[in-house]
Image: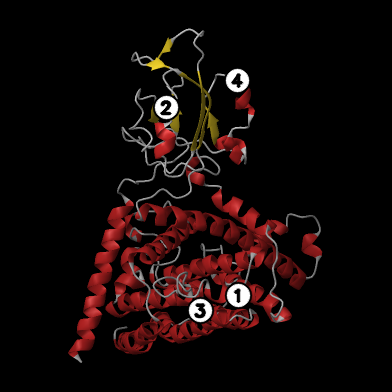
């Protein structure tokens, strides 16, 4: 019999305690960030979209070799002896003309394994994470600016096959 | 209703029509007024529930629709529900499926006809007001069982059965708690009960008498079970039965169940304020001078306070299992309600 009343007493006490906690939380600051108007501060070395500074790229292909999902497609040809010598910003001579440098961000797994082997540190991961597109082919980023000059380089680069 | 009848007298030649027709028109007009008022109230109650639940959970709730804290969110939701496709399961029992939401809605709305908003602001002051409310709110049981059965879905049927069992069981301690007050007043009419509490906060039944103080808590908890609010929301528990008896309803039919739940909350809070918190009476004792706050404002403020407590309880307490729910009703609420009724009866007879 006393169990019955003790149970009722315990119910009432614990219910009041829960109500007090809920009431207290009514006045605590909300943790919601109202996203499009307020964006969260991304930490310093956030890994999001890749960016390649093509003026520094020597076309070595180390990043494409190490990528676990093969999202980087690089095609190069040797620069001719009559062309002027060009250098990257840290002084490395650029011997290859990179005419295709495509990164398919739909394949990228954001592991950043491609950033470390780059000899001139031109490939970096930026904190840009808002890049939704309507067509999945727009997720392939073409960084190369040079055009191929030799005859054999006329086949289509691989990444544009959707 | 009387004030609306006087308003209608301003129409030329209205006074020449037969008396019964005048009363009929006045009643129709008051019903339309209260229907519109209750619907607008429900819109804002849904918004209030979303904001209150959000802030209790450390989040913000609707912020976008309509500008300031998303006040137009429910209007947008209502429009969306109106535009949704009306899906009726192929094997569902046609007539029952269509009638069930209407029945639940009508049961909830019809009970708002006797809520005393002010000294003359009541649709109709029935001399059996309290009995009418208890009887009409039980009609929703039929609607719930119909919805569960006609959905042709065994989980909806479970939800409907449990809901019906819960509502029917909890009506008994609720009615006994109501009788605790009715014995002291001597009348079932809502306005008489409010008039017995006029004169200040010490005259409210909540504070006048230890038996009615307990009866308030018994009535309030039983009313939570009547409207299927947490902690008693097994019939519509989201994680247990998908959505219980209204799983198979979409669009406006679902909106009917949802609106009916909120109107039920208003009715039950209205009955609790009439019986225990003094209805439209003022807070300050009468001898401290004239009262400035009009009756309907007082009533609405008390009802909103009680509804806030209902919403607060939803987010403070976990859901009860069905057997625990039945244990609470038959083994805790009912004995307490009877003891309080006995005490109240003694007081009514020997403490004149």
Identify the subunit bearing mark 1: B
- Determine whether, in the image, residue A18 is placed left or right of residue B247: left
Q: For the point 25% across and 81% down, which residue is it?
A: A8
Q: Is label 2 or label 1 in front?
A: 2
Residue B156: percent from the left, percent from the top? 56, 79
Tell me the residue that label 3 is attached to. B130
Q: Is label 2 or label 3 in front?
A: 2
Give the label on residue B104, or none. Answer: 1
Give the label on residue A66, or none. Answer: none
Q: Are marks 4 and 2 in contact (CB under 8 Å)?
A: no
Callout 3 environment at 10 Å: few (<14), some (14 to 19), or many (20+)?
many
Q: Is label 3 or label 4 in front?
A: 4
Identify the subunit bearing mark 3: B
Cα distance in 3D space between marks 3 and 4: 96 Å
Q: For the point 70% across and 80% down, which residue is it?
A: B91
Give the label on residue A60, or none. Answer: 2
**As drawn, A96 above or below B350:** above
Q: Is label 1 or label 4 in front?
A: 4
Tell which circle, 4 or 2, labels the residue nearer the N-terminal end: 2
Residue B198: percent from the left, percent from the top? 40, 66
Q: Are marks 2 and 3 in contact (CB under 8 Å)?
A: no
Q: Are marks 2 and 1 on the same chain?
A: no
Cα distance in 3D space between marks 1 and 4: 80 Å
């Amino acid at each position: 019999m006393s169990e019955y009343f003790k149970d009722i007493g315990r119910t009432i006490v614990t219910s009041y305690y829960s109500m007090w906690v809920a009431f207290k939380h009514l006045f605590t600051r909300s943790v919601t960030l109202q996203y499009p108007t307020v964006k969260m501060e991304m930490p310093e070395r956030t890994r999001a979209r890749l960016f390649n500074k093509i003026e520094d790229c020597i076309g070595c292909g180390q990043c494409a070799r190490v990528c676990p999902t093969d999202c980087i497609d690089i095609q190069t040809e040797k620069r001719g002896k009559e062309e002027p010598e060009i250098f990257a910003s840290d002084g490395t001579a650029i011997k290859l003309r990179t005419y295709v440098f495509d990164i398919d961000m739909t394949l990228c797994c954001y592991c950043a394994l491609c950033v470390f082997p780059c000899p001139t540190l031109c490939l970096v991961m930026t904190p840009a994470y808002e890049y939704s597109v309507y067509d999945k082919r727009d997720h392939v980023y073409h960084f190369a600016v040079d055009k191929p000059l030799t005859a054999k380089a006329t086949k289509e680069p691989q990444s544009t096959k959707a | 209703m009387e004030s609306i009848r006087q308003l209608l007298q301003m129409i030329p030649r209205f006074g020449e029509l037969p008396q019964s027709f005048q009363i009929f028109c006045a009643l129709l007009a008051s019903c339309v007024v209260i229907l519109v008022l209750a619907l607008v109230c429900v819109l804002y109650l849904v918004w209030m529930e979303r904001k209150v639940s959000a802030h209790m959970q450390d989040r913000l709730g609707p912020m976008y629709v309509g500008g300031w804290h998303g006040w137009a969110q429910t209007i947008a939701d209502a429009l969306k529900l109106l535009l949704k496709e009306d899906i009726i399961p192929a094997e569902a029992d046609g007539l029952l499926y269509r009638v069930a939401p209407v029945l639940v809605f009508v049961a909830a709305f019809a009970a708002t006809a006797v809520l005393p908003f002010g000294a003359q602001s009541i649709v109709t002051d029935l001399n059996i007001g309290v009995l009418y409310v208890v009887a009409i709110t039980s009609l929703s049981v039929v609607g719930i069982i119909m919805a569960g059965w006609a959905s042709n879905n065994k989980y909806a049927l479970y939800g409907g059965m449990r809901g019906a069992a819960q509502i029917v069981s909890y009506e008994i301690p609720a009615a006994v708690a109501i009788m605790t007050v009715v014995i002291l007043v001597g009348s079932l009419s809502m306005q008489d009960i409010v008039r017995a509490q006029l004169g200040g906060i010490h005259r409210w039944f909540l504070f006048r008498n230890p038996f009615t103080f307990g009866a308030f808590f018994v009535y309030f908890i039983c009313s939570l079970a009547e409207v299927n609010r947490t902690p008693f929301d097994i019939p519509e528990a989201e994680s247990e039965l998908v959505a219980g008896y209204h799983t198979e309803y979409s669009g406006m039919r679902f909106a009917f169940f949802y609106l009916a739940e909120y109107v039920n909350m208003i009715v039950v809070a209205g009955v609790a304020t009439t019986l225990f918190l003094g209805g439209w009476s003022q807070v300050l004792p009468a001898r401290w001078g004239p009262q400035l706050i009009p009756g309907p404002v007082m009533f609405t403020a008390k009802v909103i306070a009680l509804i806030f407590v209902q919403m607060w309880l939803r987010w403070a307490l976990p859901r009860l299992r069905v057997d625990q729910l039945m244990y609470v009703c038959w083994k805790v609420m009912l004995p307490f309600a009877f003891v309080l009724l006995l005490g109240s009866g003694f007081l009514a007879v020997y403490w004149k």
